[in-house]
Image (spheres, rainbow, N blue to C red):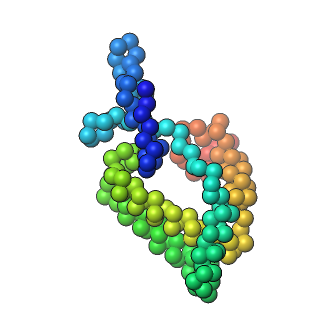
Amino acid sequence: MLATHRNGDCGVKEDVSSPAVNGEATEASTGLKLQNGTTVRPENFTFTPEPTLENIRRMQAEFTDERNWQQFHQPRNLLLAMVGEVGEVSELFQWRGEVAEGLPDWTESEREHLAHELSDVLIYLVELAEKCHVDLPQAVLRKMALNRMKYPASKVHGSAKKYTEYKD
């Protein structure tokens, strides 16, 4: 049985039943072992359907308009602000070594801090796309189609090589 932690769980479920195969627990059945002895197993994480990127764009445009900040929110400034926010995300991971999916060793406060910084990055990205007239959802669809051609699963499965390193 899996107990789900919904508040800031970052997509992690705790395995409270310790399923076993032939009387012995397997790595797949027990998931990740934490330093505190708790075992967790990442679940398939999904985003909530709302807000959409368009909703986020509208909320940020309203926020900016209410403060008369449009004059400061030009593409170059937005890009530099976003890079600064990416740096703040990086600081949260600095000196931690490898971090397990779902951030099982992070405190609730650390997870919330990460959520704030990632939100800042997304807000700036969406506003930058707006100012550059890039329909981000459509651009993602086009980019994913290109990536599928560059990295066909049959050729690259399990490899981290760049597409220029693959031979036909």
Where is 148 relative to 55, above or below? above
Q: Quadrant of residue 130?
A: bottom right
Horizontal side of residue 16 vs 118, given as left or right:
left
100, 158: nearer the viewer = 100
Q: Please state the horizontal and vertical placement of residue 62, each as a whole percent of the image.
A: 63, 75
Where is 6 relative to 66, above or below? above
Q: Please state the horizontal and vertical placement of residue 73, each as a whole percent of the image.
A: 60, 81
Residue at 63%, 51% in the rendered image:
49
Residue at 64%, 74% in the rendered image:
61
Image quadrant where one finds the N terminus: top left
Residue 98 in sight in this render = no
Where is 6 relative to 92, above or below? above
Q: Please state the horizontal and vertical placement of residue 38, each as a whole percent of the image.
A: 31, 36
Residue 77 in sight in this render = yes
Image quadrant where one finds the C terminus: top right
68, 37: nearer the viewer = 68
